[in-house]
Each structure stands twice: as C-alpha cells, then as structure tokens.
Amino acid sequence: MMTPTRRVSIVSGLFALALLMHAAPAFATGKDDVDDPTADPAPCLAAAAKPDEADHTIALCTRLLGNRKLERDDRLKALVARGGALARSGQLDRALVDYDDALRLDPKQPDVLNARGEVWRLKGDRPKALLDFSAALKLQPDHAGARANHKSLAAELERLGAQKAVDGKPSFDCRRARRAVEKAICADRDLANLDREINAMYQRVLQDNAKDNAMAKPAELQALKRAQDSFLARRNTAYGKPGYDLRAAMKARLQQLSGKDGY
C-alpha cells in the first residue's frame, strides 16, 4: 500500500516535470544515434507523466541523458523525469543524484527543490528536507506543495523535539528520589518513560471522568484516586522483594488506565 508521503512525492515529482516541459520540436532518433543533436526528449518526458511506468521512464531517460549533445534545457527535464521515476521505484539515492544534477544546471527551481526535499524526508533526513522546502519557498513563497510540506515537517520536528526533551524522564524529580524504587526508575530509561506515561494517563482519566460526568459523585473520583494510590503504595513496598516484577507491574497499570473500563 502506498503511503501518503510516497503519494506526495510522486505528485510533486510529476508536477515539477510538468512545469519544466515546454513545447519542443520532435525528431526521430535512431538506436545508434547516441550523440544525435536532434535526439527527441519527448518519449522520456511522456513516459514520466505515467506513474506506473517508472522502469520504462528510467530506461528512456537514461538513454537520452547519455547523449552528450543534449541541450541544457532538455537535460534538465530528463534529469527531473528520471529522478521522479527513481523515487517512485524506491531508488532514493539515485533520485537525489539526478535532482542534485538538475539543480546544478539551474538552482532556481522551486519544484525540483520541493521534490528533492520529499526524497530526503523519505530517507529520514528531516533537516535536509526542511532546508529544501525552505529554499523552495524562498524562491516561490506561494508554492503550495512546499508550503504544505514545510508546515507538516516543522510540526513533526516540534513533536519529536518535545518527545526528546522528556525522553528518559519520569513524572517526578529524580534529584529528590529517596526510595529504592524511585532510584531504579530514574536509572532505567524505559521505566522512566513508563512512569511518565502512567502519570499522564492517570491525569487524563481524572480529567475525562470529571468532564464526561458533570454529575459524577465525589466517591467515583475518590475511587480513581485510591486505585492510583494503591498501585504506588504496592510499588514502593513490594519493589525488591521476591516475585515482584516492577516493569510488569507498571505495564499492567498503564494497560489498566488505558482500558475500556476507564482504569
């Protein structure tokens, strides 16, 4: 199944190519005319307009790009066409090479910058992707694709930054940890994350219960609090004793809080 990001990459690659294509005279090309100055770029560009013909596009454009007498504008179009086809077929490194070559021929191509940024994003290099989206917007502030990509990637980076800031940190201040169980949680990244998730889920359950049940009895909220207090009390006293698995107990509590019964 094609991912949304992959679909965006395909659309942007084809859009970049469409804007580069201009009406040009067509000439027949013989199989042996590798450096024929009249070589026709039309088959390469026509194949590139069909997303399901990536391999055919790569073959046609590779032959065209082998023509040393290919005009600059046609070479630029062929590089973008092949780059998009390579990206669609999952050959991301080769696609980057073609987009790099295209931008060396003409660095002021917002569509190519946006397409290359999407390839960087597919490869997981978010900083480079963001640089390309920003460069595209600098050249064309109203570029819809680059604007959407920049916005979504910036939001993704913000979320990742927030997650990284709290990664490995429990819900309490480790500098004030006194109990053996608290020190154990602080010393283990996974346990610290579990503790933070348990506390966050508990607070959410309390808020949701109060919000969804305006007429909720105080006893019901007290029951939620007692359940949490009971978990913490057992955790504090049972840790270190034979048969007690802290990690399993914390996972069970998280599952209980996120379960259908509200706990």
Image (cartoon, rainbow, N blue to C red):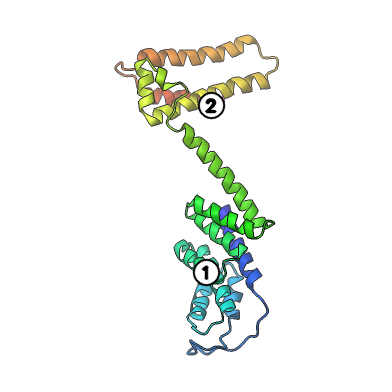
Q: Percent x, y for residue 129?
A: 53, 54
- Callout 1: 10 Å neighbours few (<14), some, many (20+)? few
Q: Residue at x 34, y 19 (%)?
A: 244
Q: Residue at x 40, y 16 (%)?
A: 235
Q: Is residue 14 left or right of residue 188?
A: right
State the residue in front, 117 or 105.
Answer: 105
Q: Amino acid at mark 1?
A: Arg
Where 114 falls versus 54 (above or below)? above
The answer to whether residue 3 is seen in the rendering is no
Q: At numbered mark 1, what does the secondary structure look like: helix, strand or loop?
A: helix
Where 187 falls versus 34 (above or below)? above
Q: Residue at x 34, y 17 (%)?
A: 180
Q: Quadrant of the C terminus?
A: top right
State the residue in front, 18 or 226.
Answer: 18
Q: Which residue is mark 1?
A: 104
Where 229 falls versus 16 (above or below)? above
State the residue in front, 232 or 217.
Answer: 232
The answer to whether residue 235 is seen in the rendering is yes
Q: Quadrant of the N terminus?
A: bottom right
Q: Residue furthest top?
A: 219
Q: Which residue is mark 2?
A: 259
